[in-house]
Image (cartoon, coloured by chain):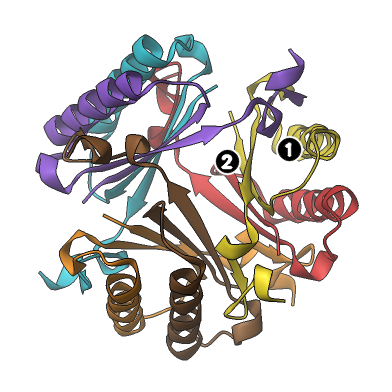
Chain colours: A red, B orange, C brown, D cyan, E purple, F yellow
Amino acid sequence: MPVVHVNLIEGRTKEQKKAMAEEITESVHKHAGAPKQVITVVFHDIDGDSWAAGGALFSDR
Amino acid sequence: MPVVHVNLIEGRTKEQKKAMAEEITESVHKHAGAPKQVITVVFHDIDGDSWAAGGALFSDR
Amino acid sequence: MPVVHVNLIEGRTKEQKKAMAEEITESVHKHAGAPKQVITVVFHDIDGDSWAAGGALFSDR
Amino acid sequence: MPVVHVNLIEGRTKEQKKAMAEEITESVHKHAGAPKQVITVVFHDIDGDSWAAGGALFSDR
Amino acid sequence: MPVVHVNLIEGRTKEQKKAMAEEITESVHKHAGAPKQVITVVFHDIDGDSWAAGGALFSDR
Amino acid sequence: MPVVHVNLIEGRTKEQKKAMAEEITESVHKHAGAPKQVITVVFHDIDGDSWAAGGALFSDR
């Protein structure tokens, strides 16, 4: 039942998301005690104009 | 003032979102006591490579 | 698999949340075509000092 | 370390996001006491079919 | 209609949130072109055991 | 810069969150190519009256 939202700069491949989804699900399963089948992982792809750190857009770096 | 975020696999039509927005707004209005005009519903369309259940990507099923 | 996050001013009762959870789940089931058992609804209770509309805190109204 | 998610109807320009990112970062820095470099701002662009206020889709107004 | 979620370590006062809510609302109003009264700001207070940066909990620093 | 939000039923201990934060950060670091120090993990503790699966509250099971 746990729900994990992962916000990332766009450009990660399906294989990269697949690996993260497996490992994050395994970690939540192991430590939070939830069966794997009820764990949801959602990736949100954010473009470089829509992400700022320290007040500066990622696309301006 | 209530804010509802609905995360769905992409592909729902405008008509489907319209129906959900109406019914979810009605439900929150009725049970949470908020006037309809202050209720916001936001849909987030997630592609199949970005959604995992049980550690497996939706696009791999 | 759809995930719905409902942000509300705190104070809604268990019965109110139960009614909203049932109706929102029914709506998403009917219009998005997802089986009910894979639909998750999460309520986030927000206190009046932590919610602003029009730039004014709810607790100052 | 603060994380700010800004949900907007799509169509804001890079310059508009840049200005908001700078000002929001400055505000959180000043009032929450966090160094600017640890403040993250993420914009989520929502299309008009995916946003409802008062139960009506933005694209139907 | 814009919705802003601000995630912060708990402990900010009402006055601090009030100041951030005013300034963030002003910024979104000015740059995104939305009337102030339709802008929502929600603060999520996170305790130090529930926030990690660089893999380390805030409460362990 | 990646930001991960983990929604869980309340009751997980600090040690459990610490373990998940370490492993999730490691996974995002390894597969998304982000330095560990810019990865944020935030846990949201949800009480049993505020979580529904299949339309039924967790606290009613």
> On the picture, is A11 further left or further right than E21?
right
**Whether residue F1 is situated above or below residue A10 in the rendered picture:** above
Chain of the residue on which disc 2 is drawn: A
Instruction: Identify the residue at horizontal 35%, vertical 10% (top origin).
Output: D30
| Measured Cα–Cα span from mark 1 to mark 2 | 9 Å
Return the residue found at the far bottom: C30
Chain under numbered label 1? F
- Say which element carries label 1: helix
Query: Callout 2, which amino acid?
Result: Leu
Q: Residue at x 75, y 33 (%)?
A: F25
The spot of residue C41 in percent (x, y) is 54, 68
Compared with residue E18, is residue B39 higher up or lower down, i.e. above or below? below
The residue tagged 1 is: F28
Q: Residue drawn 36% across and 83% down?
A: B16
Which one is nearer the viewer's eye here, C1 or C40? C40
Residue name at image x 27 percent, y 69 percent: D49
Residue E34 visible (yes or no): no
Label 1 with label 2: CB-CB less than 8 Å: yes
Q: Is residue E11 visible?
A: yes
Q: On the image, numbered disc 2 is attached to which residue?
A: A8
Residue D18: image x %, image y %? 29, 25
Q: Nearer the viewer, residue E57 or A6?
A: E57
Q: Label 1 neighbourhood size at 10 Å, few (<14), some (14-19), many (20+)? A: many
Quadrant hosting residue B52: bottom right
In the rendered image, residue B61, in percent from the top left (x then y), is placed at: 74, 77
Disc 1 marks which amino acid? Val
